[in-house]
Image (cartoon, grey):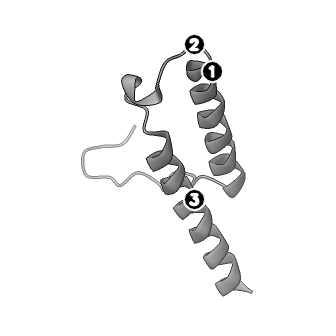
Amino acid sequence: MLSDREIAPPQRLLTRAMVIKMGDELIRLCDYIESYGLVDYEYGVWEDRIEEALEECLDMFDSRRAVSK
């Protein structure tokens, strides 16, 4: 157990595959909601904004990979 003054070890970061899987799952869930005639924003799901954020994450993965080569 960590005391109040100890720093926790770094947590594992998301992998590129995990980010892609999250995007795929978001699309699947939004498509499911849509099949019932519901509009995504009625449930507070901002699919486009979330997808843009995930794409930015993927761009960062790609740029880090290019720098490390």
Does 16 appear above or below 59? above
Which quadrant: the N terminus?
A: top left
Q: Are marks 3 and 1 in contact (CB under 8 Å)?
A: no
As rendered, which of 17 and 3 lies closer to the eye?
17
Q: Are marks 2 and 1 in contact (CB under 8 Å)?
A: yes
Whether residue 56 sits left or right of residue 49 in the image: it is: right
- Which residue is located at x 53 percent, y 63 percent? 56
Q: Which mark is residue 55?
A: 3
Element type at marker 1? helix
As rendered, which of 10 and 21 lies closer to the eye?
21
Check disc 2 and report the residue beneath it.
Answer: 36
Element type at marker 2? loop
The quadrant where residue 27 appears: top right
Rendering coords of residue 46 (x, y %) = 43, 39
- Which residue is located at x 60 percent, y 52 percent? 14
Does 38 appear above or below 28? above
Q: Which mark is residue 58?
A: none
Q: Amino acid at mark 2?
A: Tyr
Image depth: mark 2 or mark 1 in front? 2
Rendering coords of residue 68 (x, y %) = 69, 84
- CA separation in Å, label 2 and label 3: 27 Å
Within-10-Å neighbours for mark 2: few <14, some 14–19, many 20+: few
As rendered, which of 15 and 12 lies closer to the eye?
15
- CA separation in Å, label 3 and label 1: 22 Å
Within-10-Å neighbours for mark 1: few <14, some 14–19, many 20+: few
Q: Are marks 2 and 3 in contact (CB under 8 Å)?
A: no
Q: Amino acid at mark 3?
A: Glu
Please report whichever mark, 2 or 3, sits nearer to the chain's N-terminal start: 2
Check disc 1 and report the residue beneath it.
Answer: 32
Which quadrant: the C terminus?
A: bottom right
